[in-house]
Structure formats: structure tokens, C-alpha cells
Image (cartoon, rainbow, N blue to C red):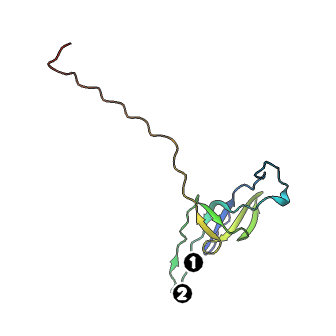
Amino acid sequence: MLRPLGNRIIVEPGPEEETSAGGIVLPDTAKKKPQEGKVIAVGPGRVLENGKRVPIPLEVGNIVVYSKYGGTEFKIQGKEYVILDAENDVLGVKPAAKPTAKPAAKPKAKAAPRKGRKK
């Protein structure tokens, strides 16, 4: 896989919209360009004038929203990717999805037998 340099990240774009809101199938020329995708690789970060490196505040697996026409598109082994500048092209990070599975119910403790009263 390609390794980004400096303050860049590699993103796998999300799927293009195949149908319109009314359910009409769109041709390739009318499809909207995706503006979000999954971070595949993160560069080491920007180097300041004093020589210190500022790391990129993104991680592999983050879902990012980016500029519509930002970055450089390329293909590797038939898959499309976009190289983006982490500061200028990335507009935001989507929050991680919350787990939908409910935790297992705790077994109820048996009540101790009561002393004294009989029925």
C-alpha cells in the first residue's frame, strides 16, 4: 500500500449515490462525487520551522468528510483512493458508531427464605 508523506492521509471514498431521492437510477456522469470516506493510511505529520513534527489528529479507520474536489484521486489494483491534505481538505470526522448490541442481562439473585412466618 502507498504510504502518505508529511501532512497527508489516504482515504477510501464511500460509495457514489446510485439513485436520486425519487428513485431514478443515475448514469455515471450524473452521480454525485462522494465527500466522505474511510482513512486507510496516515502520514507522519507536518514539520514546524523549529524542526518539531506535529502529528495528524486522525487514525486509520476514522470516517472523514472532505472537500468535494479536494485531494488527488488514484487507483491501486482496481480500487479508488484519494490522497488528502489533512489540514486543508478534511472538513471533519464523523463520530464512531455506538455499539447496538445490548449487554447481557445479569442473573437475578435468589431471595433468601424468610424466617418466622408460615402460611
Q: Is residue 33 left or right of residue 106?
A: right
Q: Residue at x 52, y 44 (%)?
A: 100
Give the image location of residue 23, x and y in percent: 79, 48
The residue at which mark 2 appears reads as 49
Q: Residue at x 52, y 84 (%)?
A: 51
In the displayed orientation, state which residue is furthest to the top.
Answer: 119
Q: Residue at x 51, y 41 (%)?
A: 101
In the image, 26 versus 88, the foreground residue is: 26
Determine whether 30 is above or below 111 in the image.
below
Element at label 1? strand
**Quadrant of the frame with the N terminus:** bottom right
* Circle 2: residue type: Glu
The residue at which mark 1 appears reads as 46
* Circle 1: residue type: Arg
Within 10 angstroms of label 1, few (less than 14), some, or many (20 or more) residues? Answer: some
Q: Say if mark 2 contacts mark 1, CB within 8 Å.
A: no
In the displayed orientation, state which residue is furthest to the front.
Answer: 22
**Quadrant of the frame with the C terminus:** top left
